[in-house]
Amino acid sequence: MILECEHVVAGYDGSDILKGLSFSLEKGTTTCIVGPNGAGKSTVLRVLSGLLKTRQGKVIFNGQSLAGRSTSQILSLGIVQVPQEHSLFPEMTVKENVRLGGYLLRDNALVNKRLQEVEELFPLVKERASERAVNLSGGQRRLIEFARALMLDPTLILLDEPSMGLDPKTLKQIFDSMKAMQEIGKTILLVEQNVRAGLSVATHGLVLESGKVRMEGSAQDVLHNPEIGSLYLGGTVK
Ligand SMILES: Nc1ncnc2c1ncn2[C@@H]1O[C@H](COP(=O)(O)OP(=O)(O)OP(=O)(O)O)[C@@H](O)[C@H]1O
């Protein structure tokens, strides 16, 4: 297991949102977290990236506890998050934005090597290298955010609703690029409102309800579970 969450309690102000959450991620898998609004899906990602501290329980990543670690320490350990809102610097070029993803490396030769690897996986990085990020479409910006996240060669990539606001054609590119990241061995934890598409790209599914795991299993099992189907997939999600 690359990540283990054990009885995690976490929340905001006076209220607990995650109420004793336990789950684990196997290396190289893609897990899609689904569940109703407010279930705590994004909160899970915030805990794993260190933006939110746990109140109880523990998170073990690659054999090490995340307790007391800052967001940049967690980045160095190999967990990187692509946030829900777009996060490129609009006036900087694509290449400058992607290079920034390697800011913790402090070794120019290594940054250049990583940039080359990332360009191979995401040709758009090279094709639009000197374009300012502001000139890209929403889907292209998302791909560049994925590319930037890969600069540290992370073990675990957290994706918070990456398809938000994108048209169906662009959506396919986003999901294809997740598959490409899977193929190079990355472990992915994905929160996706587009439940069917999210579970289709994933190997595992985790159903969250009121801050607890309602069901976990293979993505196909979750996708075809009649109860889950009627709750989250019935009619509204294509
Ligand atoms: N910064 C915050 N301060 C206070 N409460 C918050 C904060 N962020 C989220 N919450 C609350 O925590 C609960 C869980 O939020 P979270 O974003 O994890 O849900 P979610 O499952 O991702 O749902 P959604 O699909 O609506 O994004 C919600 O009730 C939300 O209002």
Image (cartoon, rainbow, N blue to C red):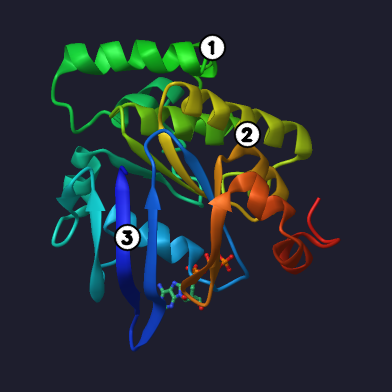
Q: Which mark is residue 182?
A: none
The disc labelled 2 sits on which kind of residue?
Phe
Q: Nearer the viewer, mark 2 or mark 3?
A: 3
Residue under pointer 3: 5
Position in image of residue 233 (x %, y %): 76, 59
Residue ID at (54%, 17%): 124
**103 to the left or right of 153:** left
Q: Secondary structure at mark 2?
A: helix
First along the sequence among labels 2 and 3 = 3
Nearer the N terminus, badge 1 or badge 3?
3
Front position among marks 1 and 2? 2
Pointer 2 residue: 175
Q: Nearer the viewer, residue 227 or 199?
A: 227
Q: Which residue: 41% across, 62% down?
A: 44
In the image, 169: left or right of 177?
right
Question: Callout 3 environment at 10 Å: few (<14), some (14 to 19), or many (20+)?
Answer: many
Q: Is residue 121 above or below residue 187?
A: above
Find out whether the residues at labels 2 and 3 contact each other: C-beta distance under 8 Å: no
CA gap between label 1 and label 3 equals 40 Å
**Residue 127: numbered disc:** 1
The amino acid beneath tag 1 is Glu
Quarter of the image with the N terminus is top left
Q: Of the residues tagged 1 and 3, which is closer to the observer?
A: 3
Image spot of residue 154 (x, y percent):
31, 33
Q: Which residue: 51% across, 18% down?
A: 122
Frontmost residue, 77 versus 57: 57
Most distant residue in the bottom direction: 14
**Percent x, y for residue 36?**
63, 70
Q: Earlier in the sequence, mark 1 or mark 2?
A: 1
What percent of the width, then of the height, locates residue 158? 42, 46
Name the residue: 30% across, 27% down: 153
